[in-house]
Every structure is written in C-alpha cells, then in structure tokens.
Image: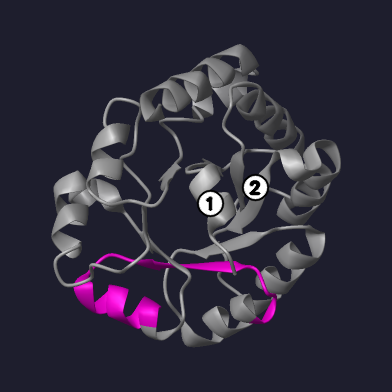
Amino acid sequence: MTLDLLRRNPIVAVLRAPTAEVALSTVDALVAGGVTAIEVTYSTPDAAGVIREVARRHGAGVYLGAGTITTPEQAAEAAEAGAQFLVSPGSVPRIAAAMHATGCVTMLGALTPTEVMVAQDLGADVVKVFPASLGGPAYLRALRGPFPNAVLMPTGGVNAGNLAEWFAAGAIAVGAGGDLVSSAAMASGDWLAITASARAFVAARA
C-alpha cells in the first residue's frame, strides 16, 4: 500500500474516547484544527461504528485508521467500516496476516531492535515504535543505525514541543495521544481546547 497519505498527514491522533459520541465530537474538533489523520482505537466503545460515521462525515478529508488491533476479527471489522490503515501495539503473526489480508496499510508495534526485525519480517508497512517515550528522539535516531530503511512512527511521548525533534530523528509520522487529545478536554466537552491543541501540533510541524 502507498504511504503517500501518511506522508501528507504525518500527525496521527490516537483517539481513546470514553464514548462513541465523544469520539465523533473529538474528531470534528481535531479536523477543525488541521489534524486529519485519525486512529480510532478499539478501547473506544463501538470503534467500528465511530470509524463508519467519521468516514461518512469527512470522507476523503481524513486519513482514517483503527488502532489497538489485537484480534483478526477487529482487523476485518475495521477495514469493512472504512479504515485505511490498521495499527497493532505488537507484532503477532496471525494478527499481522489478518491485517495484511484487508489490503489496508499495516502498522505493527515494536520497541527493541529484535522487535523491529520481527515487525519487518511480518511485512509491516510501518513500524510503530511504542512506547517511544521510553527513549525519546535519541532512541529513534539510534534505531536508524541498524535500520536505515525502516519506516518508523513513534507513538507515546510526542508533543508540540518535541515534534520537530522526532521528525529530525527520522520519523515518517508520529502518533500522539493524550498530549494532543486531552482526556480532561474530552470529559468536559472542551472541543475548542482540542482544536487549539491540534493547531499547535500543526504549527510545530510547519
């Protein structure tokens, strides 16, 4: 699968919302702020329904994916709902095979060099370096030594203040959760705060 859409939408919002309704309002707020790559995680209630509705509302205006894929059934369901990329926190052969079978961009999780090798061996289009907060941009840069051609997307520990460092270290994209999508803002329905956060991330990437 082509990675052009990921390169054009390199800030991926990792969405873990308490309800489907909050998830949809959060996506609207993120898109209003310029963050248009959305990963709806399976820790969000009715994740497939959220993906389907986001696809209906925003169409080609978003690069839409599903995250925390831990079963083959989730991979198939998310793809059917309209996901364009699938993200797993680890690299398990049967789950990777199910993700590939959908035709979606496959992102497999890894942290150590051995895990990066496993993810690549399983055919990952993108290696999700998670939790990237443990090593920071310097760790991502170190991985570039043995894996100069790996397509790396750090997730965890990414904020507007260090965003440029991650890209300078060799990230094709970044996954941002709580630092982009505040759980407090979601809980209180402060959509303007989420939009402002999205704008700060976009400005940091410019």
Query: Do the residues under discs 1 and 2 have CB atoms within 8 angstroms?
Result: yes
Please report the residue visible at 65 percent of the width from the left and 47 percent of the height from the top. Answer: 63
Please report the residue visible at 26 percent of the width from the left and 32 percent of the height from the top. Answer: 162
Residue underneath mark 1? 6
The quadrant of the image that shows the N terminus is bottom right
Res 71 → quadrant: bottom right
Q: Secondary structure at mark 1?
A: helix
The quadrant of the image that shows the C terminus is top left
Q: Please rate how many residues cluster around mark 2, counting C-alpha atoms within 10 Å: few if below 14, some from 14 to 19, many from 20.
A: many
Q: Nearer the viewer, residue 133 or 36?
A: 36
Q: Please rate how many residues cluster around mark 1, counting C-alpha atoms within 10 Å: few if below 14, some from 14 to 19, many from 20.
A: some
Q: Which mark is residue 63?
A: 2
Please report the residue visible at 73 percent of the width from the left and 66 percent of the height from the top. Answer: 79
Q: x, y (%) of residue 12?
A: 51, 43
Query: Is residue 42 something that shows in the picture?
Result: no
From the viewer's perspective, is residue 124 above or below residue 151? Answer: below
Q: Mark 1 is on which residue type?
A: Leu
Q: CA distance from mark 1 to mark 2?
A: 8 Å
Res 113 → quadrant: bottom left
Q: x, y (%) of residue 180?
A: 46, 30
Q: Which residues are magenta?
A: 101-120
From the viewer's perspective, is residue 5 above or below residue 164? Answer: below
Q: Nearer the viewer, residue 85 or 66?
A: 85
Q: Is residue 117 magenta?
A: yes
